[in-house]
Amino acid sequence: MIERILDKACAGERLSVEDGLALLQHHQLPAIGAAADRVTRRMHPESFRTYNVDRNINYTNVCTAVCDFCAFYRSPHSSEGYVLSQDELYQKVAETVELGGNQILLQGGLHPKFKLDWYEQLLSGLRQNFPSINIHGFSPPEIYHFTKVNKLTLREVLERLKAAGLGSLPGGGAEILVDRVRSKITRGKVMTDDWLEVMRVWHQLGGISSATMMFGHVETLRERMEHLQRLRDLQDETGGFTAFICWTFQPEHTAMSDIAPRGAYDYLHTQAVARLFLDNIPNIQSSWVTQGLKVGQLALLYGANDMGSLMIEENVVAEAGTVHFLTLDQIRNAISELGFQPRQRDVFYNLVPPELEEKAIRASRLKERSTGLPVLST
C-alpha cells in the first residue's frame, strides 16, 4: 500500500488525508524520504538550493497568552518582561544590513497595552531608516490580538499595517491547527479558524506568508494530517503561502518538560510526508535551528529545497534550551556537499544578485573572525 501511495505522489497525483496518515503510520523512512526527494527535484529541477540571511527580532516578551510549550514569554506582571527601545531595535537592524541581510523577522508576545498606532510607528520608522529591509512581521496570534485590543476588523488592521510597511507575514503561532490540541496547550490565544482567517485576509490583500507546524507534543498523527489539510485547503483558495517549515517541540524549560523530545527520525519522516502532501506549497525549509547541522543538511534529501536562514539572532527556541549555531560557510557547505550550488534568496524566493551574496559572505566571515563566534547571537 505504501508503494502505491508513493508512486501516486511521485506521479504528481494529490494525496488524500488517509494516504498521508498511512505514510506517517508506517516506518519506511528511506522509501518515503526518497519519494519526497523525487517530488522536490520535480518541483525544483534547478541546480541550486537556497538560504536566507535575516534576523529574528523579538520586540517584547510580554504576553497575555499562556502557552505551556513556550519558555520565552513573560506575563505582563513579570519583572523579566521587556520591550526593545527604538535604539536597540535600530542597532539590530543596522547590523543585519551590514551582514548582508535583506529581512527581519519581527515578532513578539501579545502585549496588553500597545495600540495599533504603536505598531504603525514602529513599521514606518523601520521602512524610513532601512528601505532595503523586508519586514516579515507579526504572526497570526499577534494580528488577531491587535483586532481585539483596538476593536477593529481584521481587514482594517492588516490594511493599516501593510500601508505602514509590513512586507510579509510569518506563519508563527500555528503549532497544530486543531482546536482540541490548541485548547490543551494554550490559553488566551487565537484558535484554528481565526489563525487561518488572518492568513486568508492577508492573502486577499495581495500579501504572502509562510506556513509552519510545531509537532511532537499532544497531537495525534491524524491531527498532524488535519493541520496539513487545512494549510493545503487555504493554499488552494488563496495561493499566498510561499513556504512550509516544520519542527519538533522543544520541551526543556517549559511547562510540558515531561514530554520526551522527538528526534531526527520523526522530524525527517514528518517533513517528507508534508512535502508529498502539500503539493501546492512550492518551498519547504529545513529546520537546522532545532535539528542541528547534519540533520538540517539531510532534510534537503527529505523534501526540503531551502536551508532556511542564517538567523543572525534567535530567542524563542533558545529559551527552550535548543541552540544550534551555524556559520554562513557551514550553511553553504552543507548545500555544496550534496551537489547543489548554494544561493542566497529573499523572502519572495528571488535570488539575491551575486555581488550582494558575496558581500554577505565576506561580512559574515569578518564578523566570525572578529568575535570568534558564529554570527547567530541571543
Image: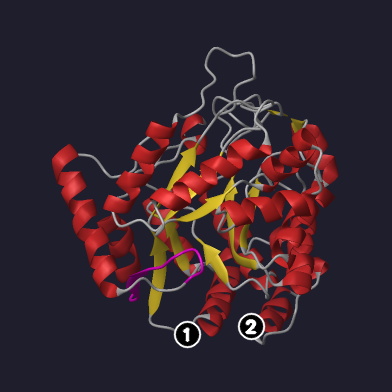
Q: Position of residue 100 (x, y in %)?
A: 30, 57
Could you tell whether 158 is left or right of 291 in the image? right
Q: Which residue is mark 2?
A: 10
Quarter placement of the N terminus: bottom right
Quarter of the image for residue 108 reads top right
Q: Is residue 30 above or below residue 140?
A: below
Could you tell whether 193 is left or right of 101 in the image? right
Mark 2 Cα shell of 10 Å, populated few (<14), some (14-19), many (≥20): some
* 301 or 353: nearer the viewer: 353
Q: Amino acid at mark 1?
A: Pro
Of pointers 1 and 2, the one earlier in the residue sequence: 2
Q: Residue at x 23, y 62 (%)?
A: 359
Quarter placement of the C terminus: top left
Dominant SS type (magenta)? loop
Q: Is residue 199 above or below residue 315?
A: below
Task: Find the magenta span and give its range.
Answer: 337-349
Q: Amino acid at mark 2?
A: Cys
Q: Position of residue 57 (x, y in %)?
A: 47, 40
Marks 1 and 2: which is nearer the front?
Answer: 1
Q: Position of residue 371 (x, y in %)?
A: 18, 38
Q: Which residue is mark 1?
A: 45
